[in-house]
Image (tube, rainbow, N blue to C red):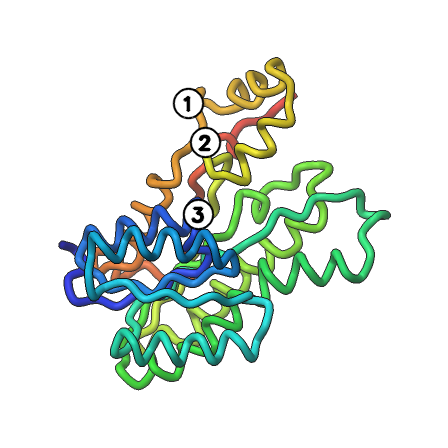
Amino acid sequence: MRLQGQRAVVTGAASGIGLATVERFLIEGASVALLDQDAPALTREGTRLGRVYPGRVHVETVDVADHGAVRGVMAASLSALGGVDILINAAGVNVFADPMAVDAELWQRCLSINLEGAWHCIQALLPSMLSQSRGHVVNIASVHGHRIIPGAFPYPVAKHGLIGLTRSLGIEYAARGIRINSISPGLIATPSAQAWLDGLSEAERLQQIELLPCKRFGDAEEVAATALFLAGDEARFINATDILIDGGRSQVYHL
């Protein structure tokens, strides 16, 4: 019960890393608001978890790219939970394309969800966190924010920006009781990653595994465990920092 009595908001909560984080936080005693734009999946998971953790699950459908909608949903979540201590920005979308094929719409979609969405959520909750002189934010960035993989543009641009946002705001509000950190997952077995892997040949999938020093993909629960650590008091001297979770792949020089 490491988060007993804590109140958390998790975006991208209907699947993958977001859902794994929600489940871990609930196990650890927190009350959690689940935010996602996938209404059917959100309703399904919210109903399932609400039966197991009655009175500690709140659900709101929202597109984090919509600044006005985010403000309204965050106000509703603050009211439902009685305040917010933790924000996990896990909402994101893979946008990989040839740079010459990226038009204004695709560029904006990538940045509005992967970068601006996190800022919208932080901006909406900061006043409440500052009023209580306490708040923990964990942004889910990516190994793409550290290493450039050809063919992945413009996703790395947004993730580099998200790590920069983390560092900038973490320093800005450190003296006022707010900690802001990020996690950069590598290849994690999430639904979106699985959809990509399903499009590869067996030889290509094996090649992806071979690139990992540990010879396996990561689990969403492993990322959730790191989010739990960063959001808790055990990490109270960790701020404006990014933690890589990629099995060591980004440290290896690949020929």
Instruction: Please state if 226 lies on the left or on the right of 150 as rendered.
Output: left
Q: Is residue 15 visible?
A: yes
Residue sitting nearer the eye, 44 or 93: 44
Residue sitting nearer the eye, 11 or 55: 55
Instruction: Please state if 64 lies on the left or on the right of 107 as rendered.
Output: left
Give the mark nearest the N terminus, 2 or 1: 1
The residue sitting at the right extreme is 100
The residue sitting at the top extreme is 203
Locate the N terminus by quadrant.
bottom left
**Measuring 35% from the left and 46% from the top, which residue is drawn there?**
20
Q: Nearer the viewer, mark 2 or mark 1?
A: 1
Q: Are marks 1 and 3 in contact (CB under 8 Å)?
A: no
Callout 3 amino acid? Ser
Query: Looking at the rendering, which quadrant does residue 148 occupy?
Result: top right
Give the mark nearest the N terminus, 1 or 3: 3
| Residue 193 placement (x, y as % from top left) | 54, 36
Locate the C terminus by quadrant.
top right
**Measuring 65% from the left and 50% from the top, which residue is drawn there?**
155
Q: Which residue is mark 1?
A: 214
Tag on residue 15? Answer: 3
How many callouts does the rendering have? 3
How far apart marks 2 and 3 lie (CA) works out to 25 Å
Q: Is residue 24 above or below residue 81?
A: above
**Measuring 58% from the left and 58% from the top, which residue is drawn there?**
114
Tag on residue 248? Answer: 2
